[in-house]
Image (cartoon, helix red, strand yellow):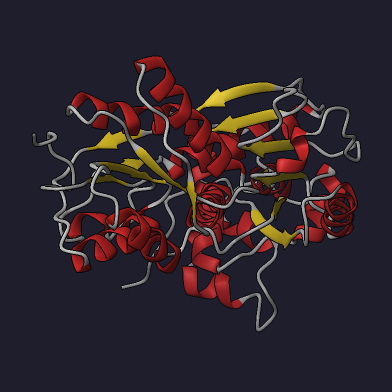
Amino acid sequence: MTDFIPTAGVAASRPLTERAGAAGHRPPSQGDVAALAGVSTQTVSRVVNNRTNVDGETRERVLSAMRMLGYRANTAARALATGQFHTLGVISFDLSAYGNARTLQAISQAAQDADYSVNVTCARSQTEGAVRQAFSKLTSQAVDGIILIEAQILDRPGLQLPHGVPVVVVDGDPDRRFHTVDSNQTDGARAATEHLLKLGHRTVWHLAGPQDAFSARRRAAAWHGALKAAGAPVPAVLYGDWSAQSGYEAGRKIAAREDVTAVFAGNDHMALGLIRALSEAGRRVPGDVSVVGYDDVAEAEFFLPPLTTVRQNFDEVGRRCVSLLLDQIHSGREAAGGVHSVPPKLVVRTSTAPRRG
């Protein structure tokens, strides 16, 4: 049986195979799509360029014809027509960090859902020169806007970034010069610390991430603030590098102290190393020491014991970043800065328990 597209006009009355074959071996054109959908090439162009002056039924007919013919828009021509390249740039400083990698993944998915591609570059250091170089590299690749992930350099008052391209920042920019999507490290770390205090622990030790990491500093500051607010002693901070190995090494020091009954680890991987060190020293989790992590990695519920941790909503962070950037791109102007908070969630499992004794 021959397939037909139920549209008006002579073109729609011809078999699909005959009309598709008319293009020969060349890629299908907008004219081929128009003939198959029974509309004008101008209407196809409006759909390709996401114009709003096309009714829903006609748009779906055009999209269906594009799918059937395997039509792909000429992005160069579209860019000339619209002044947009449908490409977003992302600058990161450490893609080996779990949070940064998950944020990038979420941004890429949200961009894809909006029919945008993503170009990524890593700045070599947190310096103005490195950031400017990354901006230059991305703008030379014709991006419509740029997202910066955990750019500590934006903490510097008066720092100037190149103008002319919309910017959104993930976790950073206390001066609010740009739109910032804040994954609220402060609330997450405070919730972790207060959870342990409510279980009756007199204080909470903290195994922090690298001192030059924005998220590590925010989490450590919130831990410190929660202890002070509760009138609890504030132990010295131990530092790791986000890895399980660094958590293990710090854990050996913690295990040697009988007075430690609760630890908030700056991420789940360090918590994993910490738990192993405690186990090797004969310190039970949570019987002797309660442990809370951060991130809620996919494996956290399979730790032994399953890890109490703080879950970050990376998917929502990615969607907010792309939405804010596209709002600026489509409006044609760089918006004034503002903070858009994505709250974390404490996930209680069995690595925490009331203090004994």
Instruction: Examine the rendering and report whether any part of residue 158 can be seen.
Output: yes
**Quadrant of res 69:** bottom right
* Quarter of the image that includes the N terminus: bottom left
Residue drawn at point x = 29 percent, y = 51 percent: 257
Residue beneath the point at 90% across and 52% down: 129
Is 70 located above or below residue 284 in the figure?
below
Nearer the observer, 82 or 231: 231
Q: Residue at x 65, y 57 (%)?
A: 117
Instruction: Pick the residue in front: 182 or 163.
Output: 182
Q: Give the side of residue 59 with respect to residue 287, left or right.
A: right
Query: Relative to 224, is 164 above or below?
Result: below
Viewer-side residue, 118 vs 47: 118
Q: Residue furthest bottom?
A: 25
Q: In this rendering, does residue 52 appear at all?
A: no
Give the percent coordinates (x, y) of residue 51: 68, 36
**x then y, percent, for residue 192:** 33, 34
Measuring from the top left, give residue 249's x and y in whole percent. 41, 65
Quadrant containing the C terminus in the rendered view: top left
How many callouts does the rendering have?
0
In the image, taking residue 132 as reference, residue 50 lies left or right, namely: left
> Going 43% across and 20% down the picture, which residue do you hit?
228
Residue 309 in the image: state x and y as whole percent: 29, 43
Question: In the displayed structure, does residue 278 sit left or right of residue 234?
Answer: left
